[in-house]
Amino acid sequence: MPPRASKATDPRSHPRWGRRLAAAVFAVGLTASLAPAAAAGGNGPDYNGHETINTSILHTYDELAAELEKQDARQEALELEVIGQSVKGRDLFLAKYVNDPANPTILFLTQQHGNEQLTTEGALEFIKHLGSARLGDTLEHVNVLIVPMLNPDGAMGDVDFSLDDYVASGDRHLTRYNAVGADLNRDHVDRVQPETRALHEKVLGAYEIDYMIDLHHQGTRSARDGQLVSGSILHPTTPEVDPDVLEGSKRLGAVVFDAVDSTGWGHLGKYAGGDATTISRNGVAVEYGISTLLFEMRGMSDHEYEPYVLGQKSNGYLRQQTLVTLEAAVQSIADGSIESADTSFWDTLAEQEWMPRDE
């Protein structure tokens, strides 16, 4: 990688950092405090056979594309690129903020699984914030890449298999898999699917990326210390990862954990993940030397298995959790405070456990 200008590693050396993060956390905390009490701490209701699951409140692919194009026209710093097409021919987008190639770069990847959309909703809000004065001069010190929907066919339910058993109502069903039933997050070695090929050829292999957060959703019943989590995180766990890359991943996790878990309503656990390099958290770290972090938000937008689906009363705080995650990560890289992030919390962070549902 090209040499980069040194930055202060003590977060207190950048006075704007504390104010910005505090403001972001306050805004999100205020939003949560105005929501129903059940939404605090990740305890929004799961489907349970009677909660409303209405997919019409989520951006369709066409609405996503229109919003990205609108922001591209409005924001001088944003460049919107089409990196390829899905199985069904939908364009795959990359939103780019690259002010200086010598700056550190972070990639945010959402919706490898089409039924995990609230992270995409949060990423769209983040893109709007990048076009405002909210983050100050942050983009002068960090490059940001966002793939906001890698699996548009699954997100639109435009697939070559039945979704009759899926529980959501609304304009469409959303499914984990792409149009031919492939799990894109198990395709990072063979790259059989056009979506994963595009990601590797036009993004991962085309830019000098330092950090990546891969945003997913999990089931509704995961808990840490007896309390349902709002999400969970995990660094690469394959023994093949370079120790320095792993350490960067742990620092990125520390930034995210501190930002989210300190809100009072966010409650994160350690994800129970494997070491296969076919998944992006491990494979990308090994192949490209990118420090990666998996973030699994609570609940999915649709599924055939009811305990995975979250009632839409929780949508607001999960979008805000995504926003807090993305902003904290970008700001910590921009001001250099990520270099001194305390990773010792990983030693005591409890691995989440399944909490049975009260019947």
Image (cartoon, helix red, strand yellow):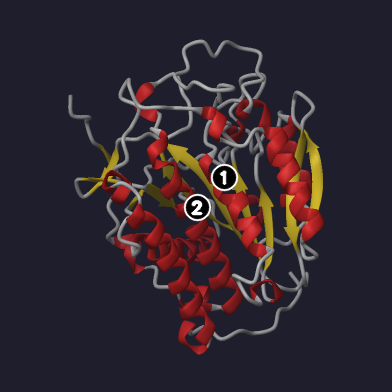
Frontmost residue, 266 versus 52: 52
Frontmost residue, 192 versus 304: 304
The secondary structure type at the circle numbered 2 is: helix
**Left or right of 147 on screen, residue 118:** left
Give the label on residue 322, or none. 2
Q: Can you tell which of label 1 and label 2 is closer to the viewer?
A: 1
Residue 88 visible, this angle: yes
The secondary structure type at the circle numbered 1 is: helix
Residue at 69 percent across and 63 percent down: it is 131
Frontmost residue, 291 versus 216: 216
The answer to whether marks 1 and 2 mark residues whose Cβ atoms lie closer than 8 Å is yes
Outermost front residue: 34
Q: Earlier in the sequence, mark 1 or mark 2?
A: 1
Q: Position of residue 39 (x, y in %)?
A: 32, 46
Give the label on residue 121, or none. 1
Query: Which amino acid lies under the numbered mark 2 shown in the image of this protein?
Result: Thr
As measured in the structure, the alpha-carbon distance from the residue carrying label 1 to the one carrying label 2 is 9 Å
Q: Position of residue 137 (x, y in %)?
A: 66, 77
Q: Taking 31 as reference, is 259 above or below it?
A: below
Query: Which amino acid lies under the numbered mark 1 shown in the image of this protein?
Result: Glu
